[in-house]
Image: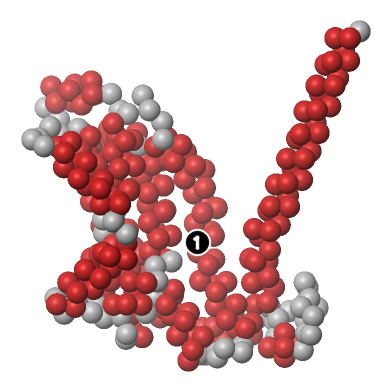
Amino acid sequence: MDYEKIEKATERRKKAVKSVTYVFLTLWAIVVLFPFYWMVLTSFKGYGAYNSEWVPKLYTLSPTLQNYKDAFTEVPLGDYFINTVIFTLITTALMVVITVLAAFAFSRLQFYGRDLVFTIFLTLMMIPGELVVITNFVTITNLDLRNTFTGLILPSVTSVFYIYLLKENFAQIPNELYYAAKVDGTSDLRYLLKVMVPICKPTIVTVTVLKVIECWNSYVWPRLITDDAAYFLVSNGIQEIRENGFGRDNIPAMMASVVVISLPLVVLFVIFRKKIMAGVSRGGMKG
């Protein structure tokens, strides 16, 4: 009898803990998602309707798409999109190639001072990015690459963290596979492409998606290295829109532009969220 009471009490505690957990997660989700809801809601409000609200409303009875139309007709948002797509695709492609090759070299190839070089390489993660920006700016300026896609792309094609993440992932693949492939006469490049890349695909997809997000949100470097609107990306182009496009007062039009800019990243994360989680968890496993 006492056994049943203890079991029921334990079950009630579990349900209570689960209920509290779900309530907390629900409240936290509301806090996190509310800014996005407010952004989308404001983008559907007319300029006059928004300014006439003395107390902000959490709904609108007269939604309009005019703000989205203005985002592509009144300001060069489409040009900013094209620039960002070019910058993101080229930078991500180069970074993935460099990261895969570097991770393979550090995890499989045997050469003098490999571990020392990798240790020194990791120490670069301790250097604040702001210090590197100054050096990169001077270098790109001296090479006369300001206001060019080359100047935008070059400083972003490597990442110590991504190389480290993929190197640890490659290191989990048994060495016996590599030795067996070498006995069969397989080249290092063929082994990398046919064995290691397919096995570590989740991590490579994760690195790719994270780099796309990083490029899409890049602000400091593009703002620093470009002062020609023809090379503006969406991140710094939105500031140009605010200053010289819609103006500071047209908040609904600004929100429409921000929604359009944010939508590709949201869609990208929704599509690849499972692979991102699998890649990150796999990268942290040992053995």
Report whether residue 271 is seen.
yes
Residue at point 47% right, 81% down? 239
Q: Quadrant of residue 141?
A: bottom left
* Residue position for label 1: 265
Report whether residue 198 is seen.
no
Please state if 103 lies on the left or on the right of 21 as rendered. left
What x and y, as percent, mark residue 261?
A: 51, 71
Report the amino acid beneath label 1. Leu
Q: How many marks?
A: 1
Q: Quadrant of residue 218?
A: bottom left
What x and y, as percent, mark residue 98?
A: 23, 51
Please state if 19 lies on the left or on the right of 245 as rendered. right
Image position of 241 with respect to 18: above or below: below
Q: Characterize the local packing of mark 1: few (<14), some (14-19) or many (20 or more) Cα atoms within 10 angstroms.
A: some
Please state if 9 lies on the left or on the right of 100 as rendered. right
Farthest-out residue, right: 1
Residue at point 73% right, 52% down? 27
Is the N terminus in the top left, top right, bottom left or bottom right quadrant?
A: top right
Farthest-out residue, left: 112
What x and y, as percent, mark residue 172?
A: 32, 29
